[in-house]
Image (tube, rainbow, N blue to C red):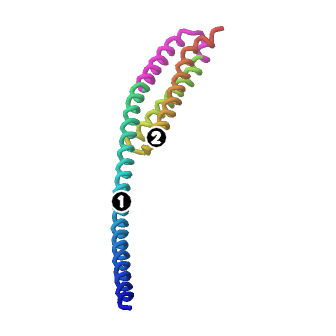
Amino acid sequence: MKKNILSLIIIIFMTGTVLTGCGETSKKDAKSVKEDVKTLNKDLTQGAKDTSEEIKTAVQSDWQKFKASSETAIENTEKQIETLRGEIAKASKNEKEKLTKELDKLEQKNKELKEKLVKRGKEFKEDMITFNKSAKSDEQKFEREFTHDMDELGRALKDLFKNNVD
């Protein structure tokens, strides 16, 4: 009987030791997991900041190149308009009115494109643009549309006299 009681006490003691040891291990594991989660969150946050900065740098660099070439194109268009005004002055009275009216429309379109470029530049200067994954595609879309409009204006200027020859 003493053996049974002694065995029972030893079994209870060992079970208590095992259970107590497991509880401490799981607490340590839980703390370790919490620390790992905090570290991962910090890493993700830093990674997002780094990616955002890379996107911002790339988009701004592309913008500067595009802005410079677009400003040059607008200046060339303005010079071309002035040249055409000189040629229109040599045309007959009937043609002069018609050509001047069309050239005024094209000149207005050139001014609108210039204002559009200035507005976009202002958005960059004042950090009104959100630099995320879609920023690069949004900027490419703007550049495509602007370039298309400039090309259309250039064709219209070249065709100004062609369309009005009787």
The C terminus - image quarter: top right
Q: Real-space Cα distance between discs 1 and 2? A: 29 Å
Q: Residue at x 47, y 17 (%)?
A: 80
**How far across and how far down the image is residue 12, in percent?**
38, 82
Residue 77 belongs to magenta span? yes
**How far across and how far down the image is residue 75, in percent?**
42, 22
Q: Residue at x 58, y 15 (%)?
A: 160
Q: Residue furthest bottom?
A: 1
Q: Considering only vertical position in the picture, is 44 above or below 138?
A: below
**How far across and how far down the image is residue 19, in percent?**
38, 76
Q: Considering only vertical position in the picture, is 73 above or below 138?
A: above
List the residue tagged with mark 1.
38
Q: Main secondary structure of the magenta part?
A: helix
Confirm or deny contact between disc 1 and disc 2 (CB under 8 A). Answer: no
Question: Disc 1 or 2, which lies upstream in sequence?
Answer: 1
Residue type, label 1: Lys
Residue 118 belongs to magenta span? no
**How far across and how far down the image is residue 41, in percent?**
38, 56
- Nearest to the eye among marks 1 and 2: give it: 1
Query: 95 left or right of 144?
Result: right
Q: Which residues are magenta?
A: 71-98
Q: Considering only vertical position in the picture, is 42 above or below 150?
A: below
Q: Which mark is residue 135?
A: 2
Per the image, label 1 sits on a secondary structure element best described as helix
Query: 63 left or right of 138?
Result: left
Badge 1: residue crowd in 10 Å (few <14, some 14–19, many ≥20): few
Between 157 and 20, the one lying in front of the other is 20
Between 61 and 41, the one lying in front of the other is 41
Between 92 and 48, the one lying in front of the other is 48
> Which image quadrant is residue 101 in?
top right
Residue type, label 2: Ala
